[in-house]
Image (cartoon, grey):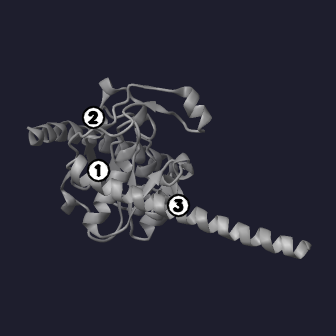
Amino acid sequence: MSESLADVIAVAGNELRFLRKMAGDVGENAWERLLEWLIDDWFRLDVLGLENIPADGPAVLVANHSGAWGLDAFVLQKTLVRSLRRPLHVLAAPFVFRLPVLGRYAARKGAVPVDQRVAMQRLGEGELVAVFPEGLAGLEKPFQERYRLQPFNPGFAVAALHTGAPVVPVTVIGAEESSPRIGEVPALAKLLDLPYFPLTSPFPLPAKWLITVGEPIAPPERPRGFGERAAAARRLSSEVQRSLQEMVERERERRDALVR
């Protein structure tokens, strides 16, 4: 009797895992189709400067982070992989991988947790890595401060110095208008175990999106001393942030001209 009950429990467990996987696959496929529709029809996204991304070998793609929901990371990964036909590993905050459907989808598409060692490993293998050095601060800024870059975490610069990979600035214009942050709901953030829960449009607004890839910035030769390396990484990070802010301002005007 006990063996029969154990068999029933085992079979039920296998069926439950199978149904859970099926539900996850359906959800991921639905998200994939929705993302493609958003990119092509809803946002009418244009991409410029793809030739600035190396056809092979490592590179660190550094992008501005904006829009209340962080949809720009999914859009950037989907758009570039579709155009370049090579993998792109996006560094994502740990909570992203806990999200239903989206977490598993992100991992399946090559997203990896924010970790300097992981980034250096991927770059050392000759792959592309994308990073949003503003982190969550880029999403939390109020709408009236849209497209003003927040302080950068220089970890990407350390990885570039260590591997010699070029840094490629990338601007994403449109996320601020499609998901404007007008506030936040701390109680919901705590309930859902999220770093924050934004008050914004429940569905992205149909703003025009423009992704522009700038010219690569070569990192300097890696200094030998720890202190010198740290200083060189900070200088590289500041240089990239200045370059990206200038690009953001220029590409906002270009996007607005395309809309007219």
Give me the residue at 51% from left, 27% from top: 185
How packed is label 2: few (under 14 Cα within 10 Å), some, or many (20 or more)?
many
- Check the picture and name the quadrant holding the C terminus: top left
Q: Which is in the foreground here, disc 1 or disc 2?
A: 1
How packed is label 1: few (under 14 Cα within 10 Å), some, or many (20 or more)?
some
Q: Which residue is mark 3?
A: 24
Give me the residue at 27% from left, 42% from top: 244
User: Of marks 1 and 2, which one's residue comes earlier in the chain?
Assistant: 1
> On the rendered structure, is 87 left or right of 185?
left
- Check the picture and name the quadrant holding the N terminus: bottom right
Q: Amino acid at mark 1?
A: Leu
Q: In the depicted view, which residue is nearer to us: 207 or 167?
A: 207
User: Of marks 1 and 3, which one's residue comes earlier in the chain?
Assistant: 3
User: Of marks 2 and 3, which one's residue comes earlier in the chain?
Assistant: 3
SS for callout 2: helix
Is 59 placed above or below 140 here? below
| C-alpha distance separating marks 1 and 2 | 14 Å
Q: Which residue is mark 1?
A: 38
Q: Which residue is mark 2?
A: 177
SS for callout 3: helix
Q: Are marks 1 and 2 in contact (CB under 8 Å)?
A: no
Q: Amino acid at mark 3?
A: Gly
How packed is label 3: few (under 14 Cα within 10 Å), some, or many (20 or more)?
some
Give me the residue at 48% from left, 53% from top: 102
| C-alpha distance separating marks 1 and 3 | 21 Å
Where is residue 252, by image quadrant?
A: top left
| C-alpha distance separating marks 2 and 3 | 30 Å
Q: Give the image location of residue 74, x and y in percent.
A: 38, 52
Q: Which is in the foreground here, disc 2 or disc 3?
A: 3
Q: Give the image location of residue 66, x and y in percent.
A: 35, 38
